[in-house]
Image: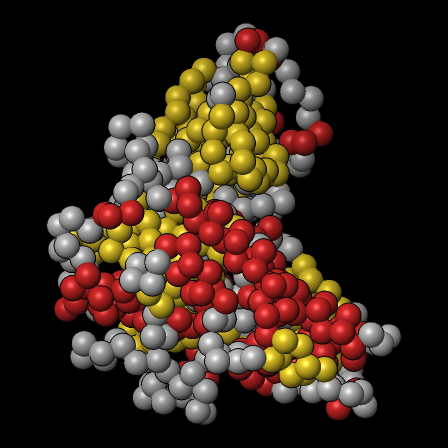
Amino acid sequence: MKLGIDFGTTHTVVALVDRGNYPVVSFEGVDAVPSLVAAHEAGELLFGAEAASVRHVDGWSVLRSFKRLLNDAGPKSEVELAGQSYLLTDLLTRFLARLKDDLVHRSNAGLSPGEELDAAVSVPANASSSQRFLTLDAYARAGFRVTALLNEPSAAGFEYAHRFRTTITSKREYVLVYDLGGGTFDASLLRMTGRSNEVVTSEGVRRLGGDDFDEAIFELVRDKADVELSPPQEALLLDECVRQKEAVNPQSRRFLVDLSPMSLTPVAVPIDEVYAACAPLVERTIDAMTPALRDPRREGEEEVDWNEVAGIYIVGGAGTFPLVPRLLKERFGDKRVKRSPHPFAATAIGLAIFLDGDAGYTLSERFSRTFGVFREAEGGGEVTFDPIFEKGTPLPAPGEPPLAVVRRYQAAHNVGHFRFVECGRVEGGRPDGEVQPWDDFRFPFDPALRNAPDLATVPVERAAAGPGVEELYLVTDGGAVEVRLTVLDDGYTESFKLARSGQAVAEVAMKPAKKGRKRPAGAV
């Protein structure tokens, strides 16, 4: 069975490939699974709908929006729930394993136990390499065979092409996907020609989504209620605000919040006040979207004229909030702005379309951020930044070999100290914009140090004649980066799958004639 799976901040949606159709899977009558984990003081864990059922039960703690935690996570990142520590990657794996079980036993997907599941999955366009790696690893450990990892707005572009292909002409080949989910906002400019979708640029805000709308409305209603609330009451109020937000439609005139579970009088807020509280958030998305309207292949990265854009396509669960299309239409016009008939499911449907070989669509992705490494220069007196993969670099298509970049040099130290970062842009040769540092990476250039228990404690010394070294950087079609360092003199190699906080898995290889050590997982 082929599936498109969109693990979202608020909900997880699955779509099937079914003879040219792409139905959304229903789980006991509901078209999504809550992206929730619940832990009991006694150590029991629940996931999805079962976790939602114990949100306000004594002894249970519920982790909402845990997808957001992946932004800054490494393989050993932990979260505290009900007084106990859990590895975030284990929680994600167990959530996905429960999703797989529910697909078989509690959905209308028609799956058989043991049936192999080929999945196309997604991440935010501005997701870090670490988030991509952790996502792929969790799906694999949960029992899915991941055949493609796509950026969310890129996947939604296939849903647009499936529904609105007639809007694409030789003069209007661009579509700007506006993807507002529960935790992130992404905007990607796609160029559509024939059955080919090419990602031209991607911009976004990594921590801006429906959760922030919920918080803004919660604060507004709490101020209107003008009462002191206990933490459990605040949790109840937040859930009620979320429920009422999701019920708002273009004809709504007031926002009525039921406070009876807290023995309080209901609060009615004019809808215009709710919109006013959320409008700055929508304006931030529009400001972040605007830089995506350019084509770096053009001389001087010339901006794309609006007359070349077939439409602005609204997707993502938070895109259902009526204020979003209203402000976009006020800014860009009614005819240009289109909203997916199924905003919450557009990414999953697009992923399923991508997997359908008979649909004939292809995708060309690009790096949404620059990935590089700091290096010493001028005999150690200066530090420079070496951009390994620049923003906008095309990624390999699914099934193609990894994109490879090689650096070769003569080592000048006994220990190589590598410091990787990802950044939104490079200005004056330095990383700028939103910069994400990665922990220290140390590699033994001196063979005598290969069995050192901790290279971080070894003083870095200059070497008059160090060995020849090769750095090989490999990036998959999903954007995950692997680094392989090799001492050319004897073939000693270490490989690192990029992750955050000094917790990447390190693998050591050696030519048969040599014998090297197996380093513990230590750094990127």
Furthest residue toward right: 228
Locate residue 352, reporting x and y percent: 29, 70
Number of marks: 0
Residue drawn at (42%, 72%), measured in percent from left and top?
A: 344
Q: Where is 271 relative to 466, above or below? A: below
Foreground residue, 444 or 396? Answer: 396
Foreground residue, 197 or 115? Answer: 197
Q: Is residue 404 left or right of residue 462?
A: left
Q: Is residue 381 left or right of residue 179?
A: right
Residue drawn at (82%, 74%), measured in percent from left and top?
A: 226
Locate residue 232, reporting x and y percent: 79, 79
Residue drawn at (54%, 36%), measured in percent from left and top?
A: 433
Q: Is residue 360 something one can see in this rendering?
A: yes
| Corner quadrant of residue 421 | top right
Q: Where is 179 relative to 290, above or below? A: below
**Considering the image in quadrants, where does the C terminus appear?**
top right
Q: Where is 72 relative to 43, above or below? A: above
Q: Is residue 356 left or right of residue 263?
A: left
| Corner quadrant of residue 435 | top right
Locate residue 40, reporting x and y percent: 73, 80
Q: Is residue 513 something one can see in this rendering?
A: no
Q: Where is 149 relative to 446, above or below? A: below
Locate residue 348, reporting x and y percent: 36, 70
Residue drawn at (48%, 80%), measured in percent from left and top?
A: 251
**Considering the image in quadrants, where does the N terminus appear?**
bottom left
